[in-house]
Image (tube, helix red, strand yellow):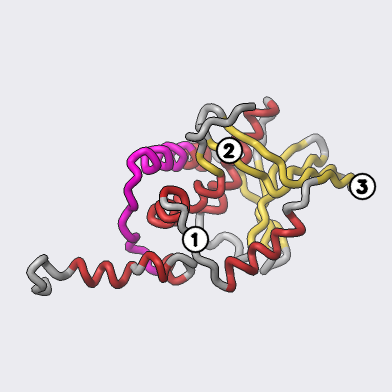
Amino acid sequence: MNMTDDYIPLAMLNALAYCPRRFGYEFIQSEMLLNEHVVEGQLRHQGVDLVGTNWLAEAVQERRVYVWSERLRIAGFCDLVELKAGAMYPVEYKKGRLGRWRNDHIQLAAQAICLEERTGETIERGYIFSFAARRREEVLFSAELRSEVERVAAEAHRLSAAGILPPPIAQRSKCRDCSLEPLCLPDELQKLATFDVGGDQHV
């Protein structure tokens, strides 16, 4: 397949669902900062990202599977595609805690939508494996979650075409967990916004 340049990587849907400004830095401006959390996540993924097939007693596992959706113009890798009891589903590996934000669910559901296009199969659920918790979380691909994937994909294409860095988000709890916070400087920008061009502060 000749992939065109306007496909959005699945990982960037995760970034956008977490924070539009993060998407702007990582995808539009190709900026990335490394901290201990990012490096730890990369190291943990080294074993996961090895391409290959595992034949287990109850399942077949295919690692690092490339998938895409021509309808949504998104593409990327599934960490793991598992076939068990006649059912196929993606498994995404994450360093942190389970279920804190919605962005991981959107990335996983996007993988399922891509797999459905490629195989013609209906995929009802997938799993997120947390290295921190050492367990899987089941994610059901509801109509609501699928619609959210379509909305995020459309917004990713819109922002990419505009080429403009979105403003910081109001949800500062996300900023504290973000590796790009030293580059984004959301609190500093908010403070500057209280001043007019003459240097007077608005109260």
Which numbered circle lies on residue 32? 1
Percent coordinates x, y for residue 83 in the rendering: 79, 40
Q: Which mark is residue 42?
A: none
Q: Residue 67 in the image: x percent, y percent?
A: 65, 36
Of badges 3 and 2, the one in the foreground is 2
Q: Would you name the residue on which mark 2 appears?
A: 75
Q: Residues within 10 Å of mark 2 (few under 14, many from 20)?
A: many
Q: Secondary structure at mark 3?
A: loop
Comes first in the chain, label 3 or label 1: 1
Instruction: Provide residue 19's location: percent of width, then percent of height.
Output: 42, 56
Give the alpha-carbon distance from disc 3 to disc 1, as whole Å. 41 Å
Per the rendered image, the range of residues in magenta is 150-172
The residue labelled by disc 3 is: 57
Q: Answer yes or no: do the residues labelled 1 and 2 have beta carbons within 8 Å?
A: no
Q: Residue reaching furthest right? A: 57
At 84% across and 44% down in the image, what residue appears? 53
The mark closer to the camera, 3 or 1, is 1
| In magenta stretch: residue 74 | no
